[in-house]
Amino acid sequence: MNLKVKAFILQLISFATLFIIVRFVLASYTNLEGMWISVTAFVIGTIAAPQFQSVKSKDGDKLFMKWIFMKDVKEIK
């Protein structure tokens, strides 16, 4: 599998997981109603989800992850 596709899929899965969890928590424990639950979950999911990126280097393609809860960029593959 191409690393760009893998990065996209990993980013999509991480965002979707956070979005669903945050949406459920907001619906259960806040007074938000209607579309505001989804909008708030979208913003939180976008900010909190890790970012994956494929980079070409002289050693070949590499996959990196950056997350707001980690100080540095982590090499995945």
Image (cartoon, grey):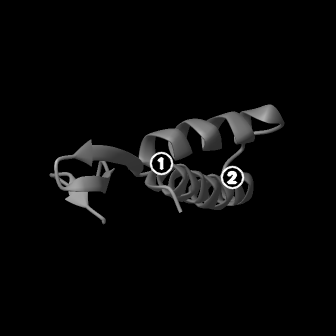
Q: Residue 28 carries which label?
A: none
Q: Is residue 54 left or right of residue 23?
A: left
Which quadrant of the figure contains the C terminus? bottom left
Q: Where is residue 3 in the image (x, y as percent from the top left)?
A: 44, 55
Towards the viewer: 70 or 62: 62
- Residue 39, quarter of picture: top right
Could you tell me which residue is drawn at 47 percent across and 48 percent down? Answer: 4
Query: Residue 46: x and y, percent?
Result: 51, 40
Amino acid at pointer 1: Lys
Residue holding disc 1: 4
Comparing 42 with 15, the one in front is 15
| Relative height, residue 49 to residue 38 (above, below) | below
> Residue visible at 51% across and 52% down?
11
> Where residue 69 sits in the image (x, y, percent)?
28, 55
Mark found first going from the N terminus, 2 or 1? 1
Pick the residue in front: 14 or 2. 2
Amino acid type at circle 2 is: Arg
- From the image, state whether disc 2 or disc 1 is nearer to you: 1
Say which residue appears at 24% left-offset and 60% top-offset.
75
Judging from the image, what secondary structure is the residue with disc 2 in? helix
Q: Is mark 1 on a helix, strand or loop?
A: helix
Q: With 29 as the anchor, is 67 left or right in this view?
A: left
| Structural crowding at the residue carrying mark 2, measured as other residues with C-alpha within 10 Å and reported as few (<14), some (14–19) or many (≥20) | many
Structural distance between the alpha carbons of marks 2 and 1: 28 Å
Furthest toward the right, the residue is: 34
Task: Determine which residue is flagged by label 2.
Answer: 23
**Count of numbered labels shown in the rendering:** 2
x and y percentages locating residue 2 in the rendered image: 50, 56
Q: Which residue is drawn at 73% across and 33% down?
A: 36
